[in-house]
Image: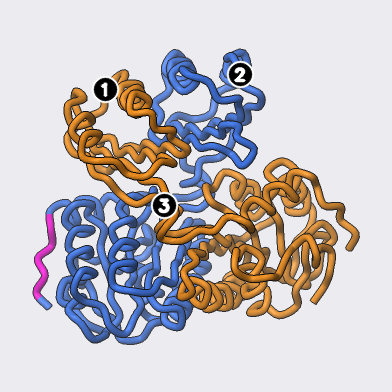
Chain colours: A orange, B blue
Amino acid sequence: MSTPLPDRLRQRYLRTKRQPVSQSIPGFALEILAEDRVGLMADVMNLVSSFKLSADFIQSWSDFDDRVHMLIQVREAAGGDEIIEAVQKIKSVEHVQLRPTNLRTYGKRVIVLGGGAQVAAVASGAIVEADRHNIRGELISVDTIAVVGEAEIAQAVRAVGRLHRAGILVLAGALMGGEITEAVTELREMYGIPVVALKMAGSVREVADLVVTDPTEAGVMAVMLLSNIGKFDLLRVHGQEF
Amino acid sequence: MSTPLPDRLRQRYLRTKRQPVSQSIPGFALEILAEDRVGLMADVMNLVSSFKLSADFIQSWSDFDDRVHMLIQVREAAGGDEIIEAVQKIKSVEHVQLRPTNLRTYGKRVIVLGGGAQVAAVASGAIVEADRHNIRGELISVDTIAVVGEAEIAQAVRAVGRLHRAGILVLAGALMGGEITEAVTELREMYGIPVVALKMAGSVREVADLVVTDPTEAGVMAVMLLSNIGKFDLLRVHGQEF
């Protein structure tokens, strides 16, 4: 394995690793339920700006009853109730609440993809290790998908680049190559997300940042790599096999 | 256990259960990387409307290098390259791509929350069962967080209501009550998300939809409850203990 370390990956990894994520980080979220209408998002965002708040995450989706559900996360500390009152006055808004941000609730994310048996083993290691970190005040969560087929796995790998707070991907399988290998290269170069692969058949381990034989250890290492407290550092162990 | 079934939960559950989610569902996403500026979101949304597309999920966030990363998911089938070309002409947009939606990539979500040992056991059952469904063409993923403390667990439970595509929550622990029980009631009544609890100490199982003793089985059942192919139906088994 002699995969180079893309600049983008190095920068993003260092930023993720150094970020102390706990219940005490600043920022809050506005959760809004509203009847949909043209200009609603613009009205909400104008109001947020008028309070001199900078939104670094916005999500808006149709709820199952066709109302609009919005989440606006800002970096600043929560102020008084003035913003709630102001949002409530926006036309068609039905319900507003101050909420903790997703980063403060679920933290950095380890993503595990692949075949069920191995995803379950990696996830188990990652969850138990994340528990140890979270008990010490960090916030790391573990998200998984068991997926079958080269094209489908490649699609799921590429989509990790669009997951908010994703810190690292673990590929759990017995054979991965072809289009999956291309997707891993794209994820590392375009989004800067590091990839750990189990020791498996196929070309994917040639382009991964780390190859780990035991699935429990792969899960544990993935969490350690994201931890702000832990000393384990991808830039030191990059390219190695365990 | 004699928890009533809120109307909202019944409606949302039926909609989730009946939704066939696979690689063949219509809809596509626009992924955009841009330099941030006032009015960017409005320009993008106006363009989407001018193509007669209806966005049912919008996400916009600051990337690690302070560029804006946007994901606009629409319900309609993907058209030609005209929309790509049109978005590329919007001021400050650097990169645009057509992508599959998150629903088509990761599907419906089972969320598992609680203590590490039990979260790992529930997740393992859920992942292996999701694998069986995904092999038959469904899409179900399993997301977890190991979290410690009554207030922190309650916060994580409430936040499930703000997770896109969340279908069901499994509480994996040995003691949950107090504020967690209030959060479960809020999640079920306000958001309509069903809750499975392990058989444990504390009041939480009195307000859960289903109580399951074995953690592997709890994970398996949670997946079966979301499956469009499977016959297992929450409205039939609601209030039971296994």
Whole-number angstrom distance, CA of label 2 to CA of label 3: 28 Å
Horizontal placement of A191 versus B30: left or right?
right
Which mark is first along the chain, 1 or 3?
1
Q: Nearer the viewer, mark 3 or mark 1?
A: 3
Q: Give the chain of mark 3.
A: A
- Residue A175: x and y in percent read 75, 67
Towards the viewer: A224 or B143: A224
- Residue A232: x and y in percent read 70, 70
Q: Quadrant of residue A126?
A: bottom right
Q: Secondary structure at mark 1?
A: loop
Towards the viewer: B173 or B166: B173
- Residue B242: x and y in percent read 26, 84
Q: Are marks 2 and 3 on the same chain?
A: no
Instruction: Relative to B5, say whether B164 is above or below.
Output: above
Q: In the rendered image, which residue does mark 3 sit on?
A: A102
Magenta span: helix, strand or loop, mainly?
loop
The magenta region covers: B2-6
Disc 2 crowd, CA 10 A, few/some/many (<14, 14-19, 20+): some
Q: Which mark is residue A37?
A: 1
Whole-number angstrom distance, CA of label 1 to CA of label 2: 26 Å
Instruction: Look at 48% across and 32% down and name the residue there.
Output: B72
Q: Is residue A196 highlighted in magenta?
A: no
What type is the residue that disc 1 sits on?
A: Arg
Q: Which mark is residue B92?
A: 2
> In the rendered image, is residue A57 in sight?
yes
**Number of marks in picture:** 3
Towards the viewer: B39 or A212: B39
